[in-house]
Image: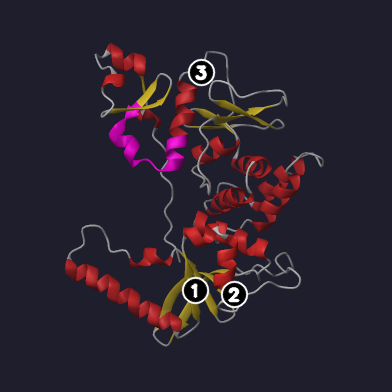
Amino acid sequence: MTALHLPVPLDPGLLRLGVDLRRAGVEPSRAVDDWHHVRHGVWVPSAHWAELAPGQRHAAVVHAANLVRRPGHDRVVAAWSAAAVWGMPRVEDWPSCVGVLSHSRRASRSGGLCPVVGGDTEPVTVQGLSVTPPARTVVDLARTGTLESAVAAADHALRNGLCTVADLSAEVAAVAPRVAGRRTAALVRDLADPGSMSAGESLSRVQMYLLGLPRPRLQVPYTDDRGLIGYTDFGWAGVAGEFDGRVKYRVPEGADPETAAQVLWEEKQREDRLRRQARVVRWVWSVALDRPALGRLLGSVGIRPERRSTWFDLGASVS
C-alpha cells in the first residue's frame, strides 16, 4: 500500500509584494538567488519555492493573482486552480494560468487568468480566496480536463472528507444535459473511490477501466499464520498489484547502517510472505502513464480484458 502523504496547504504569508520589498530596501530582481518571481509584482523566498510541490507552486500563483487584483474585481477560483488550493492532486503538469469561474462563453484569457465557463455556485472561502466547493471543483475538472486528473481529485476529495458521493451526484445533476463534459463528470462520479491512496493509484485504476480489465479490490489485506502481512493497492483472485512499489524499500533519510539494513530485511520478509499468498506485480509512474504497457504487465499475471465490463455492476466495487 502506498504511504499516504496529505498535501500541506500553501502558506500565502510566504508571498511578498515587490513594492513592499523595495520599500524595505530589497530589490528582488537583483537578488534572484534569494527571491523567486511568482508572477508580476509578487515574490517568494527562493528557499521556500524550492521546497514546494508542483500543486503548491500553482496555489502560490493563485494567491499571487489574488494579491494584485484590482479592487472590485472579485473572482471565484475554479477547476485546476481550485484543486490546487484544496490540495487535490493532478496527473498532468499544472497550467500556468489561473482558472476563474465565468458565465460567458465569450470570455477570453487575459492577465494570466483563464475563464472556466460554468453555472452559479456558492463559493467557499479558503485562505482568503473565494473557491468553488470540492465537489463542484471535481466536476469542473471532469468537464474541462482529463478523466485521469478528475478521478485523482475525486478520490482525494472522498478520502479526505472534502465531499461525499452525494455531493458529487448533486453537482453532476446540476450540469445541463447538453453541456460538454457532463458524461465524463458522471463517469468520474461512478469511478471515484476513497480507497485509492495516491494520484498514481487513481491513474492506474482509470487505465484498468479503459483497458476493460476486471475491477480490482483496493487496499486488500493479506495474512498468513504469522498474522497480517500488509495491504496491497490492488487485488484480484490470486493476484496482488502495487503501484510504485519501490517506495517501500526507501530507507529513512539519515538512517544509520543498522537501521537501513533492518528496514530492507523487514521489507524482504514481507515480500517473501506476500509472494507465498499471491502473484505480485508492481509498476511505476512510467508504466501507469503508458496504457498498453500497463495492460501487457497485468496480462502477464493473467489479468486480461473482460468480454463485458462489470465495473458498475451491483457489488462490483468491494474496496
The answer to whether residue 190 of the structure is visible from this angle is yes
Q: Which three-letter amino acid code belongs to the residue tagged 1?
A: Val
Magenta stretch secondary structure, dominant: helix
Q: Residue shown at 27%/20% (left/top)?
A: 30
x then y, percent, for residue 49:
34, 35
Residue 312 position in % (x across, y down): 72, 64
Q: Residues within 10 Å of mark 3 (few under 14, many from 20)?
A: few
Residue 109 appears in which quarter of the rendering?
top right
Asked whether, in this view, residue 172 is left or right of residue 2, the answer is right
Q: Looking at the figure, which quarter contains the C terminus?
A: bottom right
| Residue labelled with disc 3 | 69
**Mark 1 — residue?**
281
- Under circle 1, the secondary element is strand
Q: What's drawn in magenta, residue-wise?
A: 44-58
Mark 3 or 2 closer to N-term?
Answer: 3
Numbered tag placed on residue 299 in the rendering: 2
Q: CA distance from mark 1 to mark 3?
A: 50 Å
